[in-house]
């Protein structure tokens, strides 16, 4: 197949590396420099593929060039832009998205945060892109267990590893056309915008919180070097990071 990959972050880079070994990647769409992560690595892994940025998907001349590349299928991995129907129409086999959530739970941003805060199932999903946000038919999923000691950082990396495993396990079936499309259970769906974390980040010292809820927020927002949760003291923000250790975890250090 001729692929066009829309990628960002470490997982996007790793997925691109894998896909180049399986198929012909004819195009790579990246975030603009101010929003790109692992930009250098993604460029290096693109090989001879033509490079585009997210803004190019709104430009008719660039869309024409993408059409000339004759991609069969698109693959999106942590691509933080809404993909428009005009681009999807260029892909005879559609466009798949690898989303780090167990859809329909946690559509949108920061699934690792909300699985901890809300206690919703965590996992990764490979699904078709439609006109909604993470609403398309599911191809494959993998659940990821969440420990009571997992922080947002730990769960994020668990989801990264599971995402690559799901992609590599599912790709042979995609190559052979043996995949099924299963509509999502929309009645169970949850959705969060990027800005929603701002509503949980500030800990108001004058308020009362259920202990479990407060601990969940502090766990979920611990992801250095990101600052995450905070409270205010003397007009200044004081940021909080936490570390959890189950009984017995530290015994090895005593030997």
Image (tube, rainbow, N blue to C red):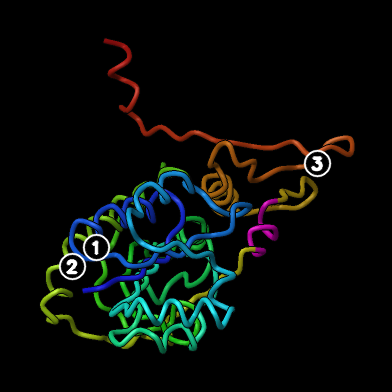
Task: Judge by depth and name the residue closer to the eye, 174 or 145.
Answer: 174
Task: Report helix, strand or loop for mark 3.
Answer: strand
The disc placed on residue 7 is none
Vertical placement of residue 3 versus 213, above or below: below
Residue density around tag 2, few if under 14, some if 14–19, many if 20 or more, within 10 Å: some
| Residue 252 in sight from this viewpoint | yes
Task: Judge by depth and name the residue closer to the eye, 214 or 229.
Answer: 229
**177 relative position to 107: left or right:** left
Q: Position of residue 184 (x, y in %)?
A: 35, 84
- The residue that disc 3 covers is 232
Q: Contact, CB < 8 Å: mark 1 with mark 2?
A: yes
The residues tagged by marks 2 and 3 sit, at their Cα atoms, a distance apart of: 49 Å
Residue density around tag 1, few if under 14, some if 14–19, many if 20 or more, within 10 Å: many
Q: Position of residue 104 (x, y in %)?
A: 40, 77
**Which quadrant: the N terminus?**
bottom left
Vertical placement of residue 94 versus 160, above or below: below
The residues tagged by marks 1 and 2 sit, at their Cα atoms, a distance apart of: 6 Å
The residues tagged by marks 1 and 3 sit, at their Cα atoms, a distance apart of: 43 Å
Name the residue rendered at 35%, 74% in the picture.
Answer: 74
Closer to the eye: label 2 or 3: 2
Q: Tell me the quarter of the picture where residue 102 sits.
A: bottom left
**235 relative position to 129: left or right:** right
Magenta span has 130?
no
Magenta span of residues: 195-201
Name the residue rendered at 12%, 81% in the picture.
Answer: 178
Q: Report the predominant secondary structure element of the magenta stretch.
A: helix
- The residue that disc 1 covers is 167
Vertical placement of residue 183 versus 105, above or below: below
The disc placed on residue 171 is 2
Q: Position of residue 46 (x, y in %)?
A: 36, 55
């Amino acid at each position: 197949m001729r692929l066009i990959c829309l990628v960002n972050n470490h997982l996007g880079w790793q997925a691109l590396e894998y896909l180049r070994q399986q198929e012909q990647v004819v195009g790579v769409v990246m975030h603009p420099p101010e929003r790109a992560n692992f930009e250098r690595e993604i460029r290096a892994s693109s090989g001879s593929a033509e490079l585009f940025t997210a803004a190019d998907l709104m430009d008719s001349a660039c869309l024409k060039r993408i059409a000339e590349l004759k991609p069969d299928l698109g693959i999106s991995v942590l691509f933080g832009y809404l993909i428009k129907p005009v681009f999807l129409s260029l892909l005879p086999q559609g466009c798949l998205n690898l989303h780090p959530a167990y859809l329909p739970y946690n559509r949108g941003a920061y699934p690792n945060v909300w699985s901890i805060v809300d206690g919703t199932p965590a996992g990764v999903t490979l699904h078709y892109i439609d006109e909604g946000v993470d609403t398309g038919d599911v191809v494959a999923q993998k659940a990821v267990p969440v420990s009571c000691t997992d922080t947002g950082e730990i769960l994020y990396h668990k989801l990264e590893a599971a995402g690559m495993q799901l992609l590599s396990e599912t790709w042979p079936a995609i190559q052979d056309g043996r995949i099924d499309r299963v509509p999502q259970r929309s009645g169970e769906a949850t959705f969060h915008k990027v800005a929603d974390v701002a509503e949980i980040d500030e800990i108001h010292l004058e308020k009362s919180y259920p202990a479990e809820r407060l601990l969940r927020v502090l766990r979920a927002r611990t992801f250095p070097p990101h600052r995450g949760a905070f409270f205010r003291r003397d007009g200044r923000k004081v940021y909080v990071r936490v570390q959890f250790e189950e009984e017995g975890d530290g015994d090895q250090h005593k030997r």
